[in-house]
Amino acid sequence: MYRAFKLVVCELGMPTVRFHDLRHSYAVVSLKSGDDVKTVQENLGLSTAAFTLDVYGHVTEKMKKDSADRMQAFIKSVSR
C-alpha cells in the first residue's frame, strides 16, 4: 500500500506527502464539513472524542463566523 501511494504521489508531481497525512486531511476536512466528532472518532478508530478534537479540531475564521451566524439565527428565532 505504501509503495503504491508513493508511486501515485510521484506520478501526480505532488510534494512529499506521508501516507499518514491522508488520515489527518480526512479528519480535518470531515470536521470542517460538519461531521460530528463522534463519527470522526469512530471512523479513525480513536479512543476519545476529546483526543480527536485536540489533534484534528482546527478552528478557522470561517468556522467561527458560521457559528456566530447560526447563533444569531437561533436567537432571532426564539425571540419572536
Image (cartoon, grey):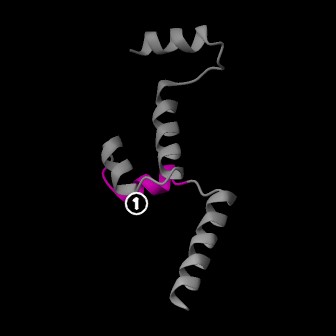
Identified at 58% across, 23% down, the residue is: 17
**Stretch of the chain drawn in magenta:** 47-57
Residue 12 rendering spot, x and y as whole percentages: 61, 12
- Magenta-span inclusion, residue 8: no
- Residue 9 found in image quarter: top right
As shown in the figure, which amino acid type bears the numbered disc 1?
Answer: Ala
Relative to 40, say whether 3 is above or below.
above
> What SS does tag 1 mark?
helix
Relative to 9, say whether 46 is above or below.
below
Identified at 59% across, 10% down, the residue is: 10
Identified at 40% across, 56% down, the residue is: 37
- Magenta-span inclusion, residue 50: yes
According to the image, label 1 marks what residue? 50
- Residue 76 found in image quarter: bottom right
Q: Classify residue 32 as left or right of residue 1.
A: right
Q: Main secondary structure of the magenta part?
A: helix
Relative to 13, say whether 60 is above or below.
below
